[in-house]
Image (spheres, helix red, strand yellow):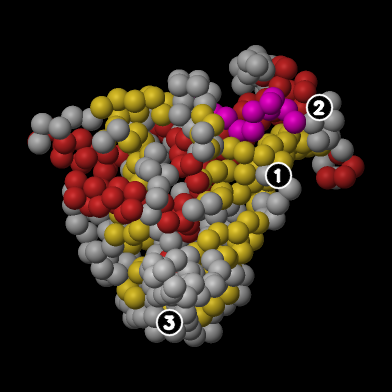
Amino acid sequence: MANPSLAEFMAQAQRGLYQNALGPDFLKKAGAGVGTPMQVDPDGSSGVFNTTYGRKVWQALNNQTRFFNAIPRTVWGNTAGWRIRSGRGTNRSLPITEVGTLPTVDISAIQTISSLPRIVATTFGASVKSIFSAQLEGGVGDVLALENENAQLDHVKEIQQELLAPNGWVSNGSDASGAAASGTFVVPASVGARFRIGDSFSKNTAGTQQNVTGLVISDVATVGTTTTISLATAASNWTDDGGDFAQVYSRAGLTSLDDIIAEDGSLIGGVGTGDNGSRVRAYDLTQDDRDAGQWNAGAYVSYNAGVGRDLSLTLLDTAIQKIRENGGEPKLILLGHDQYFKLERLLNSQQRYMGQEEYQVGVGSERTFPGTRTGLVLATYQGIPIMPDADVFGSPTVTTGAAHGSNVYVLDTDYLEIAVAQPTQYIENRDYFAVNALVVRGLLYTMAELRCKNFFVQAKIADLTA
């Protein structure tokens, strides 16, 4: 089915309150570009032309949602969770002599994973006067349709950024001691996107036990080179000794890839989390603390104590090897544009060139047709498609808290899916009495969650230089 025209889209959207206006597909955005988003000075010093052109380029490039397009979408189904086998049992399989005793009866270690959908919403609106005046000569035309189109881009972009949100940050030592006691703290703008409204995180100091927990983010505001994080409640015992770190343990939005691909006793910028310190959770795990020895150690993660190092083929080959040793087969290499160019230079210097392959989205034996729907033509390494994405973050440095170069993820996407409980819905409200204003309001919302059915066949390479 072809995508509806804008007029058809609006007509469908106004038929009913819960009409699905986006057709039979769940969420789809075609034509993702490549490159680095163009930025302009916030004070407008670049001039009118540069500012205007920069915004157009930002709109074109910074709304790419490549990773979102690469992960298969499935219907949620009649489930609130599933089971994962984390152990074989002890001595249940043994060689025996002709008259020897049978092995001890034991059972598999089965863990329960609970997963419920998350809701992402995007709103927009326009006054009755602006709707009228925008259609006059010199106006922008249908301002409501224009805002609707932009809201759709922003809605999918928000989902994309939640899927790739990093989970940790290390204090850069520049914040005033006890700053969070007032309900706010400041971080470099380069790591501001690590914090999202509604997320809960725990704060530790230099590998000690958790000393601040349950901090809920109420606002994130970036001005210039700094980002101010506002907390729903103040932290009474916040200190800043340059070795503090924070780690998200509960998401208001979708679970991120970084939440899923974690290991036991995981590090934040090279700082050990200590006993019961690392609380990154993939879904609501029965044992959500990823301390050493827990069953949900899961994925293979390569750190370097928070110190940057160059990407190497050995690091990449090891990640691929670990996935195969755990019974998986890598289907996708996800990285930032910085690591993509480094990998290309690595292969060219050794006269080993990237191949090209059509990447197909699939679960198990089910696959999309090559080049259709979310099929993409990508470079490959060892036959594994390579996908650069501008939204891939890097791990924090050990001392300053600034971000390293982007991480590299090696994924078996057969076990990753975006489960959709409710496809994107469009709701429009023209009840002027309800809002007590002559305003037309629109809402887009999606109910979904990122799910992983096998942690052990995913890998991440962190602490990489840009």
Split into 4 quadrants, where in the image is the N terminus?
top right
Instruction: Give the vertical position of 298 relative to 157 (above or below).
Output: below
Cα distance in 3D space between marks 3 and 2: 54 Å
> Which label's residue is closer to the chain start, 3 or 2?
2
Q: Which residue is mark 3?
A: 275
Measured as percent of width and height from the top left, residue 146 is found at 63, 26
Write the start and end of the magenta stretch as one range: 20-32
Q: In terms of depth relative to the viewer, which is nearer, 344 or 57?
A: 344
Q: Is residue 30 magenta?
A: yes
Q: In terms of depth relative to the viewer, which is nearer, 237 or 135?
A: 237
Q: Look at the numbered disc 3 and give the secondary structure of its residue.
A: loop
Q: Of circles 2 and 1, which is in front?
A: 1
Q: Residue at x 35, y 69 (%)?
A: 267
Q: In terms of depth relative to the viewer, which is nearer, 377 or 141?
A: 377
Mark 3 surroundings within 10 Å by alpha-carbon count, few (fewer than 14), some (14 through 19), many (20 or more): some
Cα distance in 3D space between marks 2 and 1: 28 Å
Mark 2 surroundings within 10 Å by alpha-carbon count, few (fewer than 14), some (14 through 19), many (20 or more): some
Amino acid type indicated by mark 1: Gly
Amino acid type indicated by mark 3: Asp
Q: Which residue is mark 1?
A: 77
Mark 1 surroundings within 10 Å by alpha-carbon count, few (fewer than 14), some (14 through 19), many (20 or more): few
